[in-house]
Amino acid sequence: MDKMLIVSANPHIRDKSSVTKIMHTVNLTLMPAVFASWWFFGFKAIILILVAVVSCVITEAAIQKFRKKPVTVSDGSAILTGILLGFNVPANVPWWIVALGSFFAIAIAKQAFGGLGFNIFNPALIGRAFMVASWPVQMTSNTYWTEPGTGKTMDAISSATPLNLVKTALKDGGTKETIDILADKGVTYWDLFVGNVSGCIGETSFLALLIGVIVLIALGLVNWRVPLFYIGTVFVLTWLMGYDPVFHILAGGLALGAFYMATDMVTSPISNKGNIIFAIGLGLFTVAIRIWGGYPEGVSYSILLMNCTVPLINKFTVPKKFSYIKPQKA
Amino acid sequence: MKHTFKGGYHPPDGKSFSEKMPIEKMPAPKIAAIHLHQHIGAPSKATVAVGDEVKIGQPLSEAGGFVSVPVHASISGKVKAIAKITDAAGIKSDAVVIENDGKEEMFEGVGVKVEYSGFSADAIKKKIAEAGIVGMGGARFPTHVKLSPPAEKKIDYIILNGVECEPYLTADDRLMQESPDTIIEGMKLMMKVVNAPNGIIGIEKNKPASIKIMQEKTASEKNIKVIELEVKYPQGGEKQLIAAAVGKEVPSGGLPMDVGVVVSNVGTANAVYEAVALNKPFYERVVSVTGESINNPKNVLARIGTPTTELIEFAGGVKEDVYKIINGGPMMGAAMYALDAPVHKGTSGILCLSKTNAAVYEEHPCISCGKCVSVCPMKLLPTDIQLNVQHGKYEEAEKLGILDCMLCGTCAYVCPAKRNLVHYFNVGKAKIAEMKRKK
């Protein structure tokens, strides 16, 4: 035979998975939430998501070109960062803030660390933190939140987020039940569940995000322990502290954070045990920030905080080896 | 009860190519190159010289120590050379090259039935050692050494490994269906050697014909049972098989005998029988010549030393799309570049794979998905070990248990970033061994 054969290390067969497939699958599962953002906040929301995606992709390609590295934007990870970052802004935010946030997310949080697989923090959340720190008014003040359903017209009605409402009401010495505070504004649990409330464009619909994450769990791309223990911790803590646990689960960015941000493979621990510790930590920080912190919402900061602990968690949760026997001390 | 282990993964098994093909005896090769070192342990020392006439089954060498076995002539003819020949792993080492005289003469006493019922344990063990028998599953550890536990280690079980979890391979499956009696007899001989009261035959559930025949043949034996194992790679790993069959974990760095078990491949059991009852040394074995890129997949009985090219020709030659040819299974076998490399005692298969299945991928950065961790049958952290090896931190890799790794390749199979984990583990193990030698 005169044909050259290939020689390489075993195994000689590989499954058909790839990083690119994983990233694009995650992107696809975000489509229900993209749809929800359009449904509740209008075309504007889609524009913002697109601005974020395009900025992320261009930033990544430009940096890789500049550094004379292979351009890997087709792997879908920059698109994913873009979608998640776009989800994390109010519908009325100016587009250039989103573009700058995207640039920061990719350039600083991802590429400066070495690109995909080497980043310590979730890039989209670093982008959000950067935007909140730089343009706090546009990112958090009530005038930039949009009443769902009104965004489709030019003169969107601004409206505080449910978490904002409740926090303000409690600060003012209100003793009313959470659901009553919301009821005053005409918001029900059902509205919170489907996403018919004010908030960041991709975070409000618990339902749409849930559909996506169920697909990811079924495909084995998300470790179910993270959302379960994260949301579980928030539920138990808020309940024990006398707050409304259902409200705290459905409101704000918990679903987006627990389903898509905390489960980011690169920035979460490796072992199951590690992931459980990570998720409980997330729940603790989120509740602490929501209840005692200055911000009404704590999901993004708690994920960034817990991202720092991942190497440490990995170090302390090395699985027990098969039939490993502890060396006897002499 | 489900018999299995934690972790693992089931790749598409590709067994349909050859599982229905009866074992065919291959014609003897014109030239056989028989390596002096085709087992774990010290190389054997040649006892023949160039120009000597040898007959089938005649010893060509003597063991080079306790952990060593001789090799035997697989054809009759003249010793043409004792030279460095490239083996299946691509390494050049000394081999006895015999030119076939076409007479097919047997060495004195080889193949003659022996009345062995009165043999003592030591006599059987001596026969096994002299016949050059090594583990036929692929690791090629001398069988007589396995059967020599220190006096304080009591052996409760002989476990026969009929799992054949490697995709594509069907040699053991065919042998179990075609020679069940000799396998069981070989097992009984091994039980006698180590005075083991029980025998277990472990077979994966995807071989119903083998399970059925083994169950029938052992129905009257109270102390031998057949266990059906879940279909999952690497169920045939020695430690995984023991965990599944008797629920015991072999300690890290230990041997099966530490938990009172000796594991042996079904082919080895057959060879033990032939060595003791027929006075036939190990000079031929069943090889699956299979894969999507060979014209007529077959199971063949091939002489040790037969060039791989002859097996391929016997199976109708390769198809146009052949991309990789592997000695052994697709998960742990060695990719070959020299096709004249001879069949050795551990050659369970010659696989001809196309690019569709055996594509070589570009490596991407690890995204910490944790899949390798969830499938590792030894419960290690493949990704961490790999990164430590890549950065030269061998001590760290050792702490993480690289020496427990058996190179099964399950981690690399599932890795979405297509990282060549096993390659790094090989490097790491070699470096650590080197460091230990220097100390």
Image (spheres, rainbow, N blue to C red):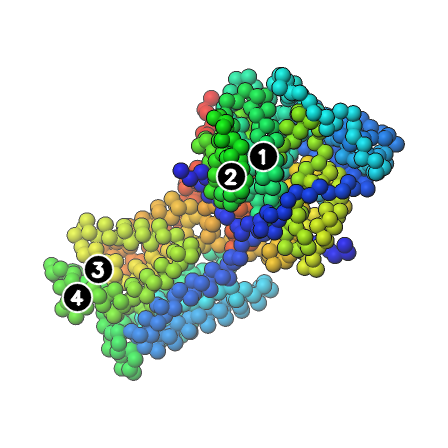
Asked whether disc 3 touches disc 1, contact meaning CB atoms under 8 Å apart, the reply is no
Does A308 sit above or below residue A61? above
- Residues at circles 2 and 4 in contact by the CB criterion of under 8 Å: no
Q: Position of residue A172 (x, y in %)?
A: 14, 62
Q: Amino acid at mark 4?
A: Leu
| Mark 4 vs 3: CB contact within 8 A | yes
Tag 4 secondary structure: helix
Disc 2 vs disc 3: which is toward the camera?
Answer: 2
Q: Is residue A66 above or below residue B220?
A: below
Whether residue B184 is visible here, answered yes or no, is yes
Task: Identify residue for label 3.
Answer: A247
Q: CA distance from mark 4 to mark 3?
A: 10 Å
Residue A227 locus on image (x, y percent): 33, 54
| Near-viewer residue (A34 or A87) | A34
Q: Amino acid at mark 1?
A: Pro
* Residue B197: image location, x then y, percent: 50, 22
Q: Amino acid at mark 2?
A: Lys
Residue corresponding to mark 1: B180
Q: Is residue A226 left or right of residue B356?
A: left
Task: Indicate the chain on which mark 3 is placed.
Answer: A
Q: Is residue B435 visible?
A: no
Which numbered tag is attached to residue B212? Answer: 2
Give x and y (percent) for residue B436.
Answer: 61, 31
